[in-house]
Amino acid sequence: MERNHLGDFELMVVAASLHLGEQAYGARIRQEIEERTGRDIALGAVYKALARLESKELVSSRLGSPRPERGGRSRRNYEVTAKGRDRFAESLHALRGMLAGLNLDWVPR
Amino acid sequence: MTRTDDPPRIPRWLLAATLPTRDVFQTLIDDLDEEFAKRRNEVDTRSGAVRWYWSQAARSTFELLLYRLECSCCAEVMRAYLRACLLFLFAFGVAEVLVGSLVSRFDVPAAVRATALAGTLVAATALGSRGSCCGSTATQRLSAPVPTNVVVGGVSMGLGVLILSSCATTPPPVVWTSWFLSASLGASLGGIRWTAAGSETFRSI
């Protein structure tokens, strides 16, 4: 049975891809997560999550145009699919449901 | 580009060696090289960028190895095998205590003793094999714990031991090694989906 909700890390990867829009590719997604969460993440972990998300059709990828700074090779750009957005919304809804009514004064902002 | 501008070769080679063949992974090294160049020029010194590259490449290599292991059919069979072995050991341990206590209480002929032992072994190994099938079903690798799997896996696991353990002169290490080998075969067979068209190993993540 396919899991309905995204895992913690998958959620971050999808959120970063949504933030970046058309600029979403492996290294940039890693940077975005690092900047927003302060977590030092391996690029391999991001690629692993992206491969899983792509096999579940939650993101799609395509090769961009060749770039001189990469020696003429292309970036692989990712886009969150409609199914991915639905799954992301479901996961957020579940998380909000769990957080509703909690006194979170002790959580640093 | 001078040689000192290049990313360190060893971690790059390690990463390339572990890269899965799927298309999506093919840009990983280029991504890493691009960020290395950016760090070397804008953020860090060359040594800082090299340290960063090593750390990224080492951790990514580990992640990719795990990914490859998760995706390999071999890992599935090994997991099924371990499940089967654990169930076998548990069931055989319990059964042996029961049979042993009955044998010591009554004067049981050798032929009956051997048959009881054989029955216990086959039942325990069938249970072990069934465990591997059920585990597979739980993770959607098999559509159902097919009875054929249980019979084929269980009997092949049990028979190997039965033949060897019936020889009174066989030293225990040989018996256990043989059990290990026949159990591997049994668990592997138990993890195969038998269909009308032939057999298909359960796999693909």
Image (spheres, helix red, strand yellow):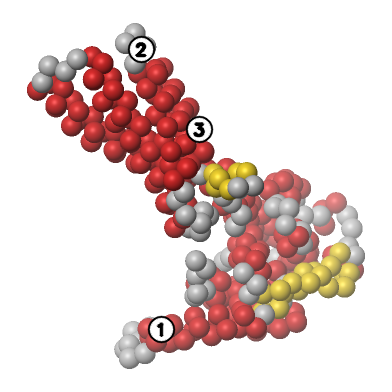
Q: Amino acid at mark 2?
A: Cys
Mark 3 residue element:
helix
Q: Position of residue B79 (x, y in %)?
A: 47, 45
Q: Residues within 10 Å of mark 1 (few under 14, many from 20)?
A: few
- Residue identifier under label 1: A108
Which residue extends farthest front?
B196
Q: Which numbered circle lies on residue B110?
A: none
Chain under disc 1 = A
Pick the residue in front: B200 or B7: B200
- Mark 3–mark 2 CB contact (< 8 Å): no
Q: Which chain's residue wears label 3? A: B
List the residue tagged with mark 2: B167
Residue name at image x 44 percent, y 58 percent: B138
Q: Quadrant of residue A44?
A: bottom right
Q: Residue at x 35, y 12 (%)?
A: B167
Label 3, label 2: how far apart the Cα atoms are: 21 Å
